[in-house]
Image (cartoon, rainbow, N blue to C red):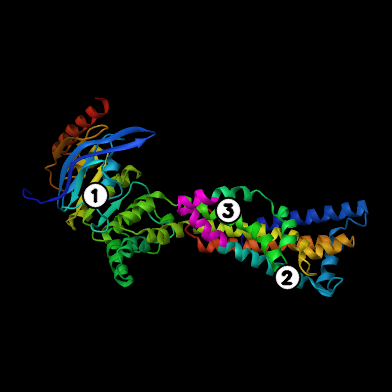
């Protein structure tokens, strides 16, 4: 756990949006590193630019200054393989489960036969075997998230980016999906960046939690969660981590 | 027929029957030779269907002629409206360039184009042009709306996989806008069909449902006029129903398709 190579370097990144000739500084000099195979959670008050950060990491947006490097080069969806799981529903309603999972493979130019084989494998992994021919409107919220996860995993991503993926789910499904995510992640050795504003979720999932300040955000603290998986939400060390991070989080919200 | 379809069917049948009875009573009461009741209209319809009109053309020939014209105009409206709608929806520059021209033209009713088309056009092109004018705008506008309604999240999702602009258009924007385009086709064909009378008013040919109406209006035989009008209405209804069931079959994934 000590000598992990730096997978992603976020180096004094600043992002300014121009809005009606006014400058809105969302991120100001944010720096941190992500290690290979790590499960990293980013928590911060709403409006602190978490989603903007994620978009910059997967090449949908660009820093105003500073740089982001993934294995030494700036993010580029043609070089890096990103598995992004969005907060909103991102399934194509006209495609059934297997065709949705195949989508990334199609874009990457994998041949049809191979794509179906891979898609079936990941549909099985996320526990949706038997639902291949179902359309999104026939699935529950949790099942749709599983499809999105399978689609992200199917391309064998270098990096999995998750933007509050479980925020819209009910508490029970959410807690179940968190366990499922850890089960899936533990077998794959993938780097995961998970954005949330739910501190308990971060402590439950992450090896490290990065706490962002309020806008314009930078790193407030990086907390290593030194607890073995699976974690017990009621155990004293879990609660003590949670309280520690919540305290910092609340400092940011209410100053 | 199960319970769920039986009652709507029963109610529509009752409604139509009551309407026809009231119409018949009203016609009897009025006893005006130019206001026929449903029975004499039905009689006229059967007469035209079997023996043909004053020129010997039967109802089926009129229907076929009208359908052919509408289909030609409609086809031209598809091959112009859909691509232009996609281009306008996808490329803001094309939108900015074309909307100042298209928007005012949209509010000129098809009838206002009649004098010009009499002067400038002949034969089939007259019919096709007027029907095209009617069908083009619903197709264009719905296609644009379909492109615009494509979810931003889906486009971003495709980009994170490294999709090219072409892939985004063919794999995301096109399938996503297709239901709306289909709605545009349905509405466009409906409007095109409704333009048939106007189009045939100026066309010289002796066949077509619109021509049939005009022919018998000149003879003051209103029973045939109404028979022709009802034929136009029923055929329009059938066309709408056919496309609607096609839409429902094609877009099962879309929960809301309204009539």
Q: Compared with residue B11, is residue A25 higher up or lower down, i.e. above or below? A: above
x and y percent of residue B258 in the render?
58, 53
Q: CA distance from mark 3 to mark 1?
A: 41 Å
Q: Position of residue A60 (x, y in %)?
A: 31, 49
When asked about the image quadrant of residue B52, the answer is bottom right
Q: Are marks 3 and 1 in contact (CB under 8 Å)?
A: no
Horizontal arrangement in the rendering, residue B111 relative to residue A110 (left or right): right
* Circle 3: element type: loop
Does the magenta portion include A124? Answer: no
Residue A64 is marked as: none
Task: Classify the position of the C terminus of chain B by image quarter.
Answer: bottom right
Residue at x-position 55% and y-position 61%: B247
* Residue bounds of the magenta highlight: B80-98
Q: Secondary structure at mark 1?
A: helix
Same chain, labels 3 and 1: no
Residue ID for mark 2:
B65
Front residue of this view, candidates B78 and A214: B78
Q: Is residue B29 left or right of residue A114?
A: right
Q: Residue at x 26, y 61 (%)?
A: A155
- Chain identity of mark 3: B
Q: Is residue B45 above or below residue A37?
A: below
Residue B7, given in percent of the width and then of the height, sits at 66, 56
Q: Which residue is mark 1?
A: A179
């Amino acid at each position: 756990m000590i000598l992990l190579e730096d997978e992603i370097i976020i180096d004094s990144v600043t992002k300014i949006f121009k809005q009606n000739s006014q400058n809105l500084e969302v991120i100001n000099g944010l720096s941190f590193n992500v290690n290979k195979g790590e499960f990293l959670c980013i928590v911060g008050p709403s409006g602190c630019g978490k989603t903007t950060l994620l978009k910059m990491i997967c090449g949908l947006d660009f820093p105003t200054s500073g740089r982001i490097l993934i294995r030494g080069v700036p993010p580029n969806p043609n070089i890096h393989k990103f598995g992004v799981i969005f907060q909103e529903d991102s399934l194509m309603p006209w495609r059934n489960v297997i065709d949705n999972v195949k989508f990334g493979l199609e874009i990457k130019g994998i041949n049809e036969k191979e794509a179906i084989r891979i898609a079936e494998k990941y549909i099985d992994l996320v526990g949706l075997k038997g639902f291949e021919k179902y359309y999104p409107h026939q699935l529950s919220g949790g099942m749709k998230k599983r499809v999105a996860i399978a689609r992200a995993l199917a391309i064998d991503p270098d990096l999995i980016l998750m933007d509050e993926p479980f925020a819209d789910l009910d508490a029970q499904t959410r807690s179940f999906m968190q366990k499922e995510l850890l089960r899936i992640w533990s077998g794959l050795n993938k780097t995961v960046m998970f954005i949330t504003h739910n501190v308990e979720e971060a402590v439950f999932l992450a090896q490290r939690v990065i706490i962002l300040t309020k806008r314009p955000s930078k790193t407030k603290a990086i907390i290593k969660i030194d607890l073995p998986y699976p974690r017990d939400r009621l155990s004293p060390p879990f609660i003590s981590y949670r309280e520690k991070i919540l305290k910092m989080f609340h400092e940011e919200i209410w100053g | 027929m199960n319970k769920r379809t039986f009652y709507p069917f029963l109610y529509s049948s009752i409604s139509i029957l009551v309407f026809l009875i009231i119409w018949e009573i009203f016609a009897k009461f009025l006893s005006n030779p130019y206001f026929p009741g449903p029975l004499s209209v039905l009689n006229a319809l059967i007469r035209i269907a079997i023996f043909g009109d004053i020129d010997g053309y039967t109802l089926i020939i009129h229907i076929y002629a009208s359908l052919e014209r509408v289909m030609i105009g409609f086809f031209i409206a598809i091959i112009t409206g859909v691509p232009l709608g996609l281009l306008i929806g996808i490329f803001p520059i094309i939108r900015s360039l074309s909307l100042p021209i298209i928007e005012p033209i949209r509010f000129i009713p098809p009838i206002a184009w009649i004098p010009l088309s009499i002067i400038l056009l002949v034969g089939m092109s007259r019919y096709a042009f007027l029907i095209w004018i009617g069908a083009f705008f619903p197709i264009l506008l719905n296609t644009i709306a379909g492109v615009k309604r494509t979810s931003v999240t889906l486009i971003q999702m495709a980009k994170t996989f490294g999709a090219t602009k072409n892939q985004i258009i063919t794999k995301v924007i096109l399938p996503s806008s297709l239901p709306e385009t289909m709605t545009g086709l349905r509405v466009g064909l409906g409007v095109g069909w409704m333009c048939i009378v106007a189009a045939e008013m100026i066309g010289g040919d002796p066949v077509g449902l619109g021509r049939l109406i005009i022919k018998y209006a000149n003879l003051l035989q209103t029973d045939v006029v109404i028979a022709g009008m009802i034929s136009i209405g029923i055929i329009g209804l059938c066309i709408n129903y056919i496309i609607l069931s096609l839409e429902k079959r094609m877009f099962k994934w879309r929960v809301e398709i309204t009539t």
